[in-house]
Amino acid sequence: MSPISTPDGSSPPARPANSPAGEPTASTDRAAPRPRPTPKPDGKQPAAGPTEPDQSGNDTSRPGPSANEPTGPHPSDATTPHPSAVHLSTAGSAAERATRDLAAQFEDEKPGRVLTGPTGLLLTGASLAVGALALWQVFRPLSQGSKYYLIIFLAGVLPLVFLAYPADLRLPARLRARRRRDSTDRDNADRDRESTQARPTATDWVLVALAAAACLYPVLPIPIGTGGGGYNAFLDRQGLLAPVDLVLGTVLLLLLLEACRRTTGWILPAVCLLFLGYGYYGGLLPQSWPVAHAGLDFSQLVDAFYNSDSGFYGTPLDVAASYIVLFTIYGAVLELSGAGRFFVELSAAAFRRSRTAAGRTAVASGFLLGTVSGSGAATTVSIGAVTWPLLRRAGYPPERAGGMLAAAGVGAILSPPTLGAAAFIIAEYLGVSYLQVLGWATVPTVLYYLGILLSVEIDARRSGVRPVVIDVGSPWRLLARFGYHFASLIAIIVLLAVGMSATRAVVFATILAVALSFLAPKNRLTLARLVTALVTGVRGVLAVTAVCAAAGIITATTTKTGLGPQAAALLIGGAKAVTSDPTLVLVLTALLAAVALSLLGLAVPVTASFVIGWVIVGPALLDLGVTAPAAAMFVFYFAVLSEVSPPTALAAVAAAAVTGGRLVPTMWQTLRYALPAYLTPIAFVITPAGLGLLGIGGVQRIAFAAVVTALSVAVLAVAAGGWLPGVGPAGVPERVLGALAGVTLLWLEPVPIAVGTALAAVAAAGVFIRRRSTGRPRTPKEEKL
């Protein structure tokens, strides 16, 4: 096989988080794998990774081996591969767009329209204006204050949502399409639907006008009856809205619900309506109920949403307008400069001679690409489209490979320096710098990927995975030529460390990335490509802005009704009903909170899940003496883990679409790989020593917590994988003992640590005894790609 091409080609960018599917790109030189094949009549789904043509040009792709398939080299593998047989990239811009479309299907938001002509120019111009406003606010903030800026920002973004995202309400057309069995008819139906959705309807334009009017009304210096009159007059009417205020506030409420429905589906609007109903009808509940309140009339609710700092223009929207938009622009610039491609190739080069090269490449790619996308499902599809052929050649079954890809992809949201949107909300809620939040996330991120890498090593030995040598040349040579892509990421950390705000740090990092792009001739960010990056970044924040503004419905209702403390009392009361021991009450409350957050995350996007979890679960943990950083990171991790939690598990669904594996087994494999991420957050809150995992408490506490938790992660990986590396298979008794040992070690106190260590030692001794009785396991034969 010829070496993998270096990243100086001009590839279209992988789809950034939250950007619309099918976004035109600046280049067509290279592309990702072919689109997902049409399902077979028997219902089985073929693998969606790149196909492997033989020397005659025929498709020789095949699914991963079944349980009964021998693990030795496949007969066709013995032939000399075609130069394009197993590359980390294939040709064809249509396939690149197909990969981005596939990613869009499994993210928190729906794919958007691809607009052309005058409407496309309007969207581009408006996106540029919003991006310019966000950049202006960083260096020359508007004199009227941050809320004034949020009003202008929402007025620029919300109308674009109705242009960029179709209503998608034609259910009969969908049902008719399902009845068509002929693939040609199905393809024609899809093209007709896409063509219709690409043209905004008259209703869309009406909603655009209403959104602009409702958003701009608070700042327009035009008297309208007893309302209007400008920004200061609008603020003076807080608590006593004029009729026109009430009407336009209601219009904006309905428009935000519709924007959320268009971008994320029905569930989040339903949750918002549930909170709205609770605020309005809660006064009718029996006053003996803990969640009852005095009741609010509709004008009070609209006032809380439209004219307070906890409603539409609260902290979530502030985060979207101040941080997320700048980071999405930065991610788009990195992608267009070739950074994403470089990160994948560097991962392959680093492990090219490793016995578990294919698995390690997938995991490392997920970590590095997370710095660009910040989206679990998008990262899963991106690394899966590139590394699934390597995993398949190594002998990974589709389900196991899918679990690995999904777990590695979700780690993107947990990994510094670009965490998910909820991390910025943590910084705002707690009044700390974003650098502190990055510090809190560092040790858990290392432990998370440690668990995945250990599982990769275990799978390679337990399942007889064939070693693969990836012939990509020296990683040092790749670093010497393209290592400048790390410069902007390092710049963010350095600038934050010297006290610069996160907004200014990311702007300067973006400028640095643009300047360094000229080191690779085909990736130069010329003016046209820079405009593409800016527009892509702004389009990437449309769905997040709708979600963050709608989250104001939840936060304002909770604040006005006092639901947070009431829910906290219920949660703690449920734990106290089981035991009166303070320590056990804290443990049970943490477990109940973890379950509640996991269930909540199945229904709503990560950002909204964190906001709801913080106002409902956060107070319960704080009331029990948990520190604010530990409580916030606890909620953050379980909000993120919804992407790998059955039965929805968006990242696992995306991985199954790439590998063609069965969905439910892929979800369970993902759960196994991501197991440390479910357990380590509990260690944050149940003991004071757990703060060491967040980098709090001095070097001694941090080292102690990290080492003990790493041992716990290793023992749990062995228990879940059923194999002790360097020794052999573990039986059921050893795995049960290992699971108990791993969970016990998470209680970072001397006695539990001693008990957990003893249980782990007994389990290891059992594995040694089992190995002596069965003999040394056979080592698979190495295969070179």
Image (spheres, rainbow, N blue to C red):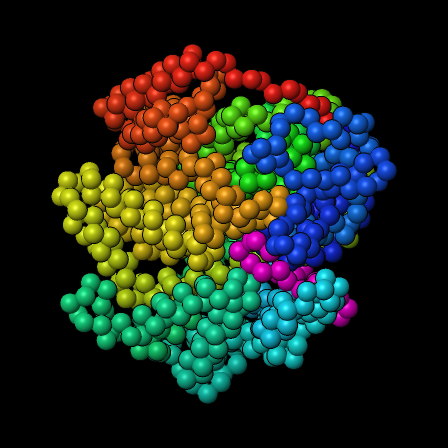
Q: Quadrant of residue 274?
A: bottom left
Kindly identify the residue that appears in the image at 40 percent across and 65 percent down: 271
Q: Quadrant of residue 512?
A: top right
- Is 117 within the magenta? yes
- Is 111 within the magenta? yes
In magenta, the rendered stretch is 104-130
Give the percent coordinates (x, y) of residue 425: 44, 51
Q: Quadrant of residue 177?
A: bottom right
Give the percent coordinates (x, y) of residue 103: 62, 51
Kindly identify the residue that appears in the image at 15 percent across and 67 percent down: 288
Q: Quadrant of the C terminus?
A: top right
Q: Residue furthest left?
A: 580
Kindly identify the residue that appears in the image at 57 percent across and 25 percent down: 464
Q: Nearer the viewer, residue 475 or 433?
A: 475
Give the percent coordinates (x, y) of residue 381: 62, 45
Q: Is residue 81 visible?
A: yes
Q: Quadrant of the N terminus?
A: top right
Q: Nearer the viewer, residue 536 or 77?
A: 77
Q: Nearer the viewer, residue 251 or 458?
A: 458
Taking 91 as reference, is 475 above or below it? above
